Amino acid sequence: MSQPSGTDQPSGTDQPSGTDQPSGTEQTSGTEQTSGTEKFSGTGPSARELLPTATGRQVRATLAELLRPRRFLAGRAFGLLVGSTAIGLLTAPLLGHIVDLVVDGRPPGAITTPTLLLGLVAVLQGITLALGLSQVARLGEGMLADLRERFIDRVLDLPLEQVERAGSGDLTARVTGDVTVVAEAVRSALPQLARSGLTIGLTLVGLAVLDWRFLLAALLAVPVQLHTARWYARRAQPLYASQRVAHGAMQQQLLDTVGGARTVRAFRLTEPHLARVSGSSVAAVELTLRGIRLMTRFFGRLNLAEFIGLTAVLVTGFLLVRADAVSVGTASAAALYFHNLFGPLNAALSLVDDAQSAAASLVRLVGVTRLPAPRRPEQRPVPVDGTVEAKELRHAYVPGHDVLHDVTFSVAPNERVALVGASGAGKTTLAKLIAGIHRSGGGSIRLGGVPIEDLGAAVAGRTVALVSQEVHVFAGPLAEDLRLAGPDATDEELTAALDTVGALGWVRALPDGLATVVGDGGHRLTAAQAQQLALARLVLAAPPVAILDEATAEAGSAGARQLETAAARALDGRTGLVVAHRLTQAAAADRIILLDAGRVAETGTHDELVAAGGRYAALWAAWTGTRETHDGTRETQDGPRETQDGTRETQQQDGTGETHRQVSSREAHRQGPVPGQWQPEPPTPAAEH
Amino acid sequence: MRTGSPTARTVLTGAITGQLRQVLASAGLSASHQAGEALVPVLIGVVIDRAVGRGGLVDLIGWIGVLAVVFAVLSTSFRLSARTGERAVEQAAHQLRLSLTRRILDHRGGAETGRLPGALVATATGDTDRVGTVNRALAAGIGAFTGLLVGGVALLVVSVPLGLLVLVGAPLLLWLAHLLGRPLERRSHAEQERAAYASGVAADLVAGLRVLKGLGAAPAAAQRYRRTSRESLAATVRAAQAQAWYDGTLLVITGLFVAAVGLLGGRLAAQGDLTVGQLVAAVGLALFLLGPLSTFGWVNAEFAQGRASADRIASVLGAPPATPAGNDSPGTPVSGRLDLRDVRHGTLRDVSLHAAPGELLGVVATDPAAADDLLRCLGRDVDPDAGTVELDGVGLHTLDPERLRAAILVAPHDADLFEGTLRENVGTPAAAEAQVRRALTAADVDEVARALPQGIDTPLTERGRSLSGGQRQRVALARALAAEPAVLVLHDPTTAVDAATEARIATGLRELRQGQTTLLVTASPALLAVTDRVVLLDDGAVRAEGSHSDLVRQDAGYRASVLR
């Protein structure tokens, strides 16, 4: 085949196009922010400890591991593509043969056979190519799937502490950016490169077969091409990286401005925001234009290489024909051969930066897959019940700055304890230590009598659950979201869990009920609904110990009340540790631990602490906001308490009896027939008065 | 914004005419590039005929010189055409982006109605890019047409029958390829989408990593991902195989086309109607012409996409305003008397509410929706279905919305912070330095700032997500206080703040707003305790009114709302 145009079609008209076609631009902008993100988090203010990247040897070893089970597939793919390319190379000599026939003055009928062969070549080449590309896809995609599964497996196993040290941006960039970059490379660059590489190699062989001097002439273009490729790769990488960053920044700014439109209007910030959008847009535009300039210079240089090579081949042909060393047909075939190279060469060279990005991303993926897997010994001690014992716990995020000092307390099975204290008192840190998310800097934690470090991640995960105010709705059907917590739960069990947390009403009202697609790109849930869902997951996971960290804070004041009821029901039948802002939650607990600057300052029941007149009493007074009218305070405190069911009243009669008695009475009730009823809602103190 | 409602057509033509000079320049250069491309195969034929075939050195040098000139022209034209074309694309997209932003931020609102922020951002980035791309498609189309013209004429000059074969055969071939490709492409597109789903699931699981870890659900999640990944693998392999067969088929029909040209050309050459060089040129031209012809297909697709995008842009630009704009200004100075008379809107049922100038009025709404509706009416995000909202006795609907917002500031519960330092976030243009200081202290942001590495000059990233919920609320509250509007409406400003801090804030708020009208829509007892008077909205209607302590003592429903 001859491709007689200056820059050859794929690269000439619509292809100069890594930037030309919309898909190209979108890809660079939207999907992958890999290198950009990495760079920027790298220069971030704190010394982040990024997740590891792999060495070249590790990458090769991983690739070899992935390839080994597929070696026959790889062999077939390679063989078919080589066959297809070799068959394709017959086109030029056949056309050359037609030229020779004409030059020799053969009759028109003689042309028929070589043209029939041309047709046959086309058919065979097409079929082998299709087969070969199919095998390449199976090979590449299969390896990719294995790799991404290994990656996610390891990521889900990583200690949260390590992820947090690296900054969640690092992991997010790897999972969204790097996986996409490698997938794109496997999907488009790999087959393209395989085809181009084979065509180039075999064409050069073909040229040498025609006459070795044609090969020499063609090779004259190579220095220019190599130089151009290196020149381009050096500039393209950083430029495209900054392009992606600029595009990401523009998108972020638009999201800021558009998402906050109501605020922008309320504070009359329209002009400054327009200026910001314009600024970020101009920056992105400028970088895109710089990219185009680079791209066109790249193709300009390749045009020069094409001209040099084509001229050299034509001159060689001229000299060889004049010396009678080759026929005119052979010279034509050589010219056509070289022309056929324009496409594959340009394609291969413009894949240089794709290949570079893919390699960089691969290094970051393999780096995570090669992290040592956590040890999973077969025999782990199993907690006997839901007790929590903390002894002399200490913790520091920055060495020397302890946020917890010798915190000691214990929680009986099925007891509900509220953790209160000002911001920064260490409530959340304590919650994370007990949930096994952070390791303590000193002291010990025992769950059900077993030291937490002896439980291992899997058992600890089943023993204690932490629900924080950070809610995430997993994309997909609602039922699937819930089944993350209870993989074997039936629809009835899901419904029961939703009912427990008072979410069944709105879930039934969703367009497809439990099958409604929620989360990113699906039906949007309100913050309060998402939090109810988190509580429903807790019910399904059914751990003996549950920790709620401000799990009701996101909702407005009216929604918070519903959530508190939901949380209380979700805690039924397990040990509960509740980090609470709203002191009504504390008042409803069996016992309160007040933390102050990392120390246990007060502990006792609500009534005890209020009566003691210490810090908690002051907080309670501030919360109820009725300091001036002391009587009113009493009244309002009593109001809700009296509305609670029999258990509560018993407690009050018990007065300020020790915790154990309260626990047992509470426990007795929980084992009763209607577990959700102990805190009816909404309470109506009026009826009691 | 244009007068009259924008349509897809006006958006598209606006994008083109706005960059007309660049588009025309790019089109002219593209034509020159394509003409050069068409001449290259012709020149190869000439070199073979005149030089290689006859052995003329002077001819060789001369024609290679011509080839060099053609290469130089086509290369330069391509380069300049691509640059001017891209500039036209980007500038048109940029202009549209700004128009969209301006419309979305317009004080009369309405552009966000029924659209999620993500969708609006996608319109402002993806759709504007696609409309801009029409400029390049137009230039490329003109260039391709020129290439087709030059190549066609050259072929017809070489040989009329061969020219006709190519000029009829090439479009036919592309049409055939299109027919074959359509079902394959459709299928491959659908399967690629399913493949993309796997990476979406992975990102989603990682985003929810803390939740998974908190529940010990990581193993279940890993298993689910493996399942998704395998399904996605099957889909991608199917898509790739469809694509592979499409590529193979294309190769077959192109090869057959070349064989046909070779057959006819060879026979003509053997009969002496064609020189050898012309035969080579004809084969080359036949392949070249596939390029411009397929460009037409691309241009067509780009225009179709551009029209669809232009339609989405036009519907945002032409979205009806949520509230018609009045022209009056509030009286100066604003005394701050606020009257709602029989307001009916959403869940609000005939609400009448009056705040005297300088009053600190608490509003407790048992239904969160009622609070939202009230806020929307006060901020004039909507006009009530019935009844009026008046500031100093003047209906809000007669006021210019921007000037109205200078007088009444409604700070929503889920207030957004923006990129910039904490100081920049609080100090909106409306706020003087002293005001900012006072507000920072009143909202207890001083304490927040102490915990930050660079105090109030710490940059807030990702819309303030670098702060905790409580810190964010305090900064947002400080911003609202710093603006010192004549009337300030605050909605649940302290839900994520601990009790002690909340009490401090209540005191600070009370002092700072002394003498200025303030509405506190909240159920927080600590905040309500500092109000002059509280109104209880139950079931969308005013049910009780009085001081907080009186209401707590006397009204059981109120007590139920604020204390439990």
Image (spheres, rainbow, N blue to C red):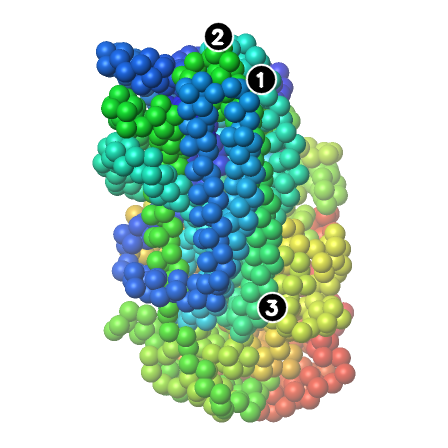
- Looking at numbered disc 1 in the image, what kind of residue is underneath it? Leu
Q: In which quarter of the image is residue A230?
A: top left
Same subunit, labels 3 and 1: the answer reads no
Q: Position of residue A343 (x, y in %)?
A: 40, 33
Q: How crowded is mark 2: few (under 14 residues within 10 Å), some or many (20 or more)?
A: few
Q: In which quarter of the image is residue A332?
A: top left
Disc 1 and disc 2 in contact, CB within 8 angstroms = no
Q: Please, which chain is the residue tagged with disc 3 on? A: A
> Which residue in the protein does label 1 denote?
B165
Q: Who comes first in sequence, dot 1 or dot 2?
A: 2
Q: Please, which chain is the residue tagged with disc 1 on? A: B
- Residue at (27%, 37%) from the top-left corner? A212
The Cα atoms of the two marked residues, 3 and 1, are separated by 64 Å
The disc placed on residue A484 is 3
Above or below, comparing residue B508 to residue A682 in the picture: above
The Cα atoms of the two marked residues, 1 and 2, are separated by 13 Å
Looking at the picture, tell me which residue is in the foreground, A346 or A522. A346
B562 left or right, relative to A172: right
- Residue at (57%, 69%) from the top-left corner? B223
- Looking at numbered disc 3 in the image, what kind of residue is underneath it? Leu
The disc placed on residue A620 is none
Looking at the picture, tell me which residue is in the foreground, A421 or A51. A51
- Residue at (33%, 17%) from the top-left corner? B53
The disc placed on residue B157 is 2
The Cα atoms of the two marked residues, 3 and 2, are separated by 72 Å
